[in-house]
Image (tube, rainbow, N blue to C red):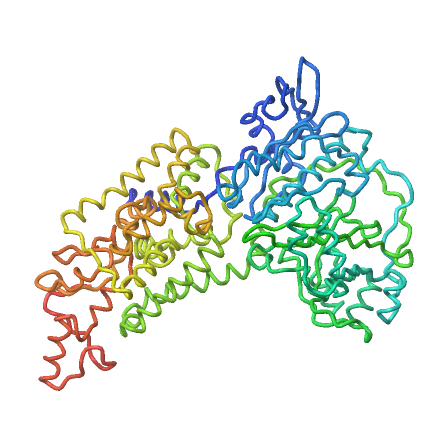
Amino acid sequence: MILPVRLILICLALLLARPLCAEPGAVTGLLPGLLAKTPAAELVPGAEAYGPPREDLAVVPVLKGGETIGWAFVTSDFVGTTGYSGKPIHTLVALDPQARILGLSLVKHSEPIVLIGIPEAKIKALVNAYIGLDLVAEAQSGGTAHEVDIISGATVTVMVIDDSIVRSGLKVARALGLGGLHPEAAATGPRFGINPNAGAPADWAAMLGDGTVRRLSLDVAAVNTAFAALEDKRAADRALAAPPGTPFIDMQVALVSVPGIGRAVLGEQEFTNLQTWLQPGDHALMLAASGLYSFKGSGYVRGGIFDRIVLIQDDVSVRFRDKMHRRLVSLAPADAPGFSETDLFRIPADSGFDPAKPFRIQLLVQREVGPIEKLFSTFDLAYQLPQAYQRPLAPPVAEAPALPDEPAAQADLWRKIWAGKQPGIVALGVMLAVLTGVFFFQGLATGHARRFFWFRMGFLTVTLVWLGWIANAQLSVVNLMALFGALVNGFSWQAFLLDPLTFILWFAVAAALLFWGRGAYCGWLCPFGALQEITNRIARACHVPQWTLPWGLHERLWPVKYMIFLGLFGASLVSIEQAEHLAEVEPFKTAIILKFMRAWPFVAYAAALLMAGLFVERFYCRYLCPLGAALAIPARIRMFDWLKRYRECGNPCQSCANQCPVQAIHPTGEINPNECVNCLHCQVLYQSKTICPVVIKQMKRRASIGAPPAGHPNAKPVLSEGASS
């Protein structure tokens, strides 16, 4: 019993991994690990080496001829860099003594569109454009002294990279005193806070007049003029056809976390609801607009981020995500305009936002100039909290800065991620609960063949569309190799908790291995497996011929996937990075994560596998999938055998063996648990009154003695002599 228990524990540990390599320097910072991979001359042309790191700041000097010519740091050590993928985008940056950017390199990220979808030349051009950027000018302009070169299809990614470079650069420059910049703590002069007793006018017109509400109004003519001024003249050729005076957008903003403003704009009840939504130190904006253009767009539905608006205050910028957003049904003032969209946005306490200082909402306006290409222009809505809502504060008492508690910060990060993913977590929980119910009560579930067929097709469609293409919860053999690397280099639960859906899915798979083997995942929860089966069903409907490989050949092709898995695992012992490249034998990234938006060889490979699957159902699952092989190995220790069989199965009856979608049933009647995907088709046949000879025979016997037929609620289960379950 000791060996099986050990095997179970090892399998559970392996299956809790996610597609994420262990972050180097999780506690001490990212800089040491990334510097080891980026020579000084590669970061800054002409540089010779890096100096010793500072003890008080995560920066190192860049040396040439023994002299310090700049300072290098990683953006993620100073600011949040979470991108479209929900994972950090790490950029290595070097500053000179005048606070100008000497060099930079995009060193580590998980952005799918940047990994393969965008040509490498575009990314290098984007990064190189920041060399020479003057951060002193950026500090004076609030981070807008430069133009952002947005790449079509990667708006969020590019904006996060830009934001992280500028904000982290300003923080480092202030901390080191580069270019004459100094820390904000050194600033002198009176400080102001919010006056909770100040009231606001009751009508909207008065609030617009005294600055309680600020407004940005653009018509079609103003927007056409802005795009016509761009260097790319295609924008002018695609000018809006509406009359010049047509309102393009009328956007208005108010800082409703200020008590007087919140009560006047939202009403007492809605302001009370706002207080329950905000955490201590948070602030909130009311944004409302009408016109041809939406400040929200639809990008936040797919990626969870509002890519058309950003709050900017000095070197602080806040990009809003779906968990920071609430819809607002109506406004309290009777004379408030009839806006087409009215929303609340939460400004987190840890963003560095100061409500008493001026800020602006930057609106990104896009214009299509090609089938998939867009150009962009920005417009600013400035806001300054009126003096009537402010009061002077006493000078702060100088205190020694507290050392950050990194484990607590990491725990707080994954808790925030889980809180933001609650709808997806609930949806995945429902899927797992339904599937568990089907497996536990498979006799009832498979009692009606047609209903079960459409239930399965519906479940696989949800797996493909939502779990795969939308949630990107496609498991991979890379998970197992990443976990092995983490176990070797120092295991931490924090890293694996950052992706809630993947964590839950792996935990469910680990539990399912003990009950049903690998089929619970491979047959029901694998998006690429679902894609294969759905396309094969479409092919059958179009009368595409189906090929059944001879049993001898089929049986000898089974081991191929195990050999692929062992080869990948062996490669991971030498180099995790090399093993991840070899793991492209899995088409999951191409077909599911990137949705075929990839270089043509990858797309051709995935398409070839799907094409083979049109003739041989689940061709890839049967013979090539290393993940299926990896799951099949620990699945041998499953504790239960739920699939019912008759003694006559295999001798003489071959119905189940002939109709098994993946040929997992031997001619002698045994089900091979390593190859079975638990589609439950054999359980449908087990109860079929028109196909299964045993059931037909039982029906005839019962009919001859007047007993209820098989499948009737009052019928007792009668098996053939020697039957088993």
Residue appearing at x 66%, y 57% in the figure: 324
With respect to residue 292, does 41 lie above or below? above
Instruction: Tally the marks.
Output: 0
Quarter-of-image position of residue 206: bottom right
Is residue 268 visible to the viewer in this orientation of the structure?
A: no
Placement of the C terminus among the 4 image quadrants? bottom left
Q: Is residue 104 left or right of residue 9?
A: right
Using the image as rendered, state which of residue 376 and residue 673 is in the foreground: 376
**Picture coordinates of residue 577 (x, y %)?**
44, 33
Position above or below: 197 against 169: below
Q: Position of residue 151 (x, y in %)?
A: 60, 45
In this view, which residue lies farthest toward the bottom? 706
Query: In the drawing, does residue 17 fall left or right of residue 495?
Result: left
- Pick whichever, 22 or 595, lies toward us: 595
Does 680 sit left or right of 324 as displayed?
left
Image location (x, y in percent) of residue 544: 25, 61
Q: Depth check: 64 or 492 in front? A: 64
Q: Nearer the viewer, residue 622 or 499?
A: 622
Residue at figure coordinates x 67%, y 31% from the top left:
131
Side of 154 relative to 435 (left or right) = right
Q: Residue furthest top?
A: 65
* Residue 519 can be seen, yes or no: yes
Residue 194 lies, in percent from the top left, at: 85, 55
